[in-house]
Image (cartoon, rainbow, N blue to C red):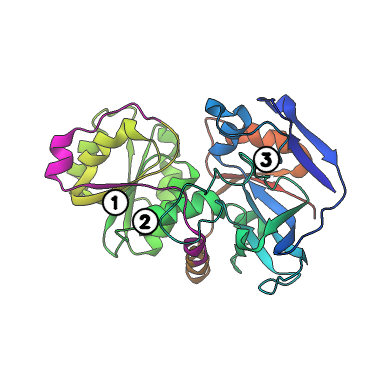
């Protein structure tokens, strides 16, 4: 079989090499998954660069966390999965139920865990869930990180209710999934962007209104004025946008903070306390939540936005496409036929 390896100590795409190895065999409590598609997340760039020196240990590693395929073989003692079952990967280790804990790691394809940029991978039985029956492998591969993060942001602690208003920051995949899920939950959705040329596409996806945060430095107040305040903010931009997020909120609103981006702001306590704002970190999500999300996707026929599909042999191009400034939708790598 073939697999992509990120060589130890390398921090550029020159260190990503394609190699041929023997097909691995599952051990007790494991399954072998024939990978049909994988998808890219921003964290793949962080793992590639070993940002902060925290993403990889000193060894070769198979990169990329999110994959979809079918079970090809099962190890001794496995009775919950059968050969031919269509599955998607589970991002974090041993994160079955809320709350998170210190041993979840940084996801497949980081630290001491191999990822899924390979024709076949070995995973524990807890590291896969059933794939949606309504999605192709390419579509299903987009779910484990971005979609589950969006689902958790909308559902944890203060679940979105019909008629509420949800604001997503930016046009990354978490934000696009949050829009789709929120609309299916009966909410109205709003979104920010720095690029007016994305406005039409966001409107086509059901956004009630689009706000340009680059041309309006007080975009939070503008959103509050236009909407009367949103009930939930899915904040994918980090703490640099927290105060504007609070401005956009209705009284009693909630912020789910997602991602690894701008950490450079300090919360203004006045409005934060006056509005009774709640704010939570979203560490992707649990295995239980992923199973709930899959059922919801099938029930509501939700389709991910895919920006580009790239063949396995050209996986380096997927990294380049994922980091492009005009990215809109998921970058998917197809594996095999």
Residue 19 in view here? yes
Residue 134 within the magenta-colored segment of the rendering: no
Q: Nearer the viewer, residue 319 or 20?
A: 20
Cβ atoms under marks 2 and 3 closer than 8 Å: no
The quarter of the image holding the C terminus is bottom right
The residue located at (81%, 37%) in the rendering is 18
Instruction: Say which label, 2 or 3, has the lower sequence index.
Output: 3
Q: Residue at x 57, y 31 (%)?
A: 324
Depth check, mark 2 against mark 3: the one in front is 3
Label 2 element class:
helix
Q: Is residue 194 left or right of residue 113?
A: left
CA distance for labels 1 and 3: 33 Å
Q: CA distance from mark 1 to mark 2?
A: 8 Å
Residue 14 placed where, x, y %? 73, 25
Indicate which label's residue lies in the foreground, 1 or 3: 3
**Can I make out residue 323 in this image?**
no
**Residue corresponding to mark 1:** 232
Kindly identify the residue that appears in the image at 49 percent across and 71 percent down: 299
Alpha carbon distance from label 2 to label 3: 28 Å
| Image position of 224 with respect to 217: above or below | below
* Residue 83 left/right relative to 86: right
Is disc 1 in contact with disc 2, using a CB cutoff of under 8 Å?
A: yes
Instruction: Determine which residue is flagged by label 3.
Output: 63
Q: In the image, which residues are magenta?
A: 262-291
Relative vertical location of residue 254 with respect to residue 160 in this rendering, above or below: above
Q: Earlier in the sequence, mark 1 or mark 2?
A: 2
Residue 154 is labelled as 2
């Amino acid at each position: 079989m073939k697999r992509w390896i990120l060589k130890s100590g390398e921090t550029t795409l020159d260190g990503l090499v394609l190699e041929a190895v023997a097909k691995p065999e599952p051990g007790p409590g494991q399954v072998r998954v024939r990978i049909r598609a994988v998808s890219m997340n921003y964290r793949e760039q962080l793992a590639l660069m070993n940002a902060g020196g925290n993403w990889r240990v000193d060894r070769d590693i198979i990169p990329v966390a999110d994959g979809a395929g079918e079970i090809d073989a099962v190890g001794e003692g496995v009775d919950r999965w059968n050969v031919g079952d269509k599955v998607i990967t589970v991002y974090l280790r041993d994160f079955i139920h809320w709350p998170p804990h210190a041993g979840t790691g940084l996801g497949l394809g980081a630290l001491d865990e191999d990822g899924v940029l390979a024709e076949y991978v070995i995973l524990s039985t807890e590291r896969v869930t059933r794939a949606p029956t309504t999605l192709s492998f390419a579509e299903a591969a987009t779910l484990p990180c971005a979609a589950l993060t969006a689902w958790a942001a909308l559902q944890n602690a203060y679940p979105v209710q019909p008629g509420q208003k949800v604001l997503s920051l930016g046009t990354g995949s978490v934000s696009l999934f949050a829009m789709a899920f929120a609309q299916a939950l009966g909410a109205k959705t709003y979104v920010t962007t720095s690029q007016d040329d994305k406005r039409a596409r966001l409107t086509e996806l059901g956004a009630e209104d689009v706000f340009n945060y680059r041309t309006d430095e007080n975009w939070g107040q503008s959103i509050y004025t236009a909407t009367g305040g949103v009930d939930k903010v899915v904040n994918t931009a980090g703490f640099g946008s927290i105060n504007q997020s609070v401005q956009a909120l209705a009284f009693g609103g909630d912020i789910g903070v997602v991602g690894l981006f701008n950490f450079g702001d300090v919360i203004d306590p006045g409005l934060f306390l006056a509005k009774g704002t709640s704010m939570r970190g979203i560490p992707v999500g649990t295995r239980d939540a992923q199973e709930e999300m899959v059922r919801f996707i099938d029930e509501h026929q939700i389709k991910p936005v895919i920006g580009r599909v790239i063949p396995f042999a050209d996986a380096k191009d997927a990294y380049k496409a994922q980091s492009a400034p005009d990215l809109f939708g998921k970058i998917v790598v197809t594996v095999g036929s």
